[in-house]
Amino acid sequence: MRVLVLEDTIEHQVRMENTLDEISKEMNIEIKAKVTGKISEFKEYVESDEVNQLYFLDIDIKGEEQKGLEMAQFIRQHNPYAIIVFVTSHSEFATLTFKYKVSALDFIDKDINDTSFKKRVKDCIHYTRNNLIENTEIVDFFEYSFRGSDIRIPFRDILYIETAGGPYKLRIVGKNFLKEFYGTIAEIQEQDLEHGNFFSPHKSYLSNIRNINGYDKKTKEVLYYDGHRSPISRLRVRYLKEILKTKNKEKKKQEGQISSSDYSS
């Protein structure tokens, strides 16, 4: 795995290098990381023939508060499918990623402790490995554009989408990640009419049908793989039960086909 880091503070350069080295050993994967705080050098790395799968970018570089966002745009021009993660103390700039049209996997606060920092970085490594490096199958993506901001994430990694408090602000709750973006539940539903990937258990939620795992009658919640939950309105329970019934039939059919195949061989 090739990782490129833009960070101009020596302390945080060393922290990132040590963190990546530890993760490399723990996951038993080779991580070739280049760390620099020089914009010209960073651009050379991006433009080189080597394809970096994962980028960790500080936003404030040598006093230029949004330089990291500009570099994210530069990356997108050369590698539209790159996975970008912002690592910064300026959490107030999170919403600007939409303005700059650079869909980011995560936004990691530098001020969190080393254990939490390592976990967040490791989650990004996991995601990159599973979706860019070891993924040999055709992937069905959730692609959505709202007022100039674009998002593209494999459907299989999405558990549900929820409103996130602010106007037109949504959040994807996925496998090992959270991602905020701008849009509306209604528009995504309309876009999904032909495909049927989502089920609306509540006016503020969209559930990814393929990752629904059950229904908790006591708490009135939709259950997903990985232990996640989301609320469901009383009027939508009947539809959820129909979905679960269909999924159960498909599962039994697949198991039957596998058993029959094994027997015939």
Image (spheres, rainbow, N blue to C red):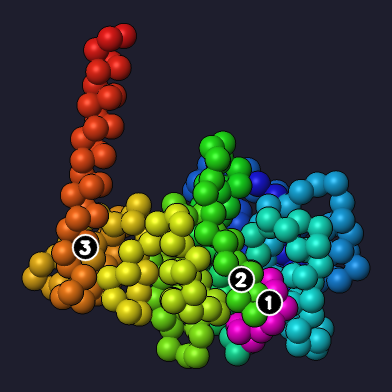
Q: Residue at x 69, y 57 (%)?
A: 82
Q: Amino acid at mark 2?
A: Ser
For discs 1 and 3, the disc positioned in front in the rendered view? 3
Q: CA distance from mark 2 to mark 3?
A: 28 Å
Q: Are marks 1 and 2 in contact (CB under 8 Å)?
A: yes
Q: Residue at x 25, y 18 (%)?
A: 260
For discs 2 and 3, the disc positioned in front in the rendered view? 3
Q: Which residue matches tag 1?
A: 148
Would you identify the image quadrant in which residue 182 lies? bottom right
Up/down of 108 relative to 176, above or below: below
Q: CA distance from mark 1 to mark 3?
A: 34 Å
Q: Position of residue 133 (x, y in %)?
A: 60, 43
Q: Which residue matches tag 2?
A: 145
Q: Are marks 1 and 3 in contact (CB under 8 Å)?
A: no
Dot 2 falls on a residue whose secondary structure is strand
Up/down of 88 relative to 135, above or below: below
Q: Residue furthest left?
A: 218
Task: Provide the residue span drawn in magenta.
Answer: 93-102
Q: Position of residue 62 (x, y in %)?
A: 81, 83
Q: CA distance from mark 1 to mark 2?
A: 6 Å
Q: Amino acid at mark 1?
A: Gly
Q: Which residue matches tag 3?
A: 239
Q: Residue at x 25, y 47 (%)?
A: 247
Q: Position of residue 38 (x, y in %)?
A: 86, 71
Does residue 87 appear anywhere in the picture? no
Q: Earlier in the sequence, mark 1 or mark 3?
A: 1
Left or right, 28 with respect to 48, comes to left
| Crowdedness near tag 2: few (<14), some (14–19) or many (≥20) residues, C-alpha within 10 Å | some
Would you identify the image quadrant in which residue 94 lies? bottom right
Dot 1 falls on a residue whose secondary structure is loop
Left or right, 247 with respect to 190, comes to left
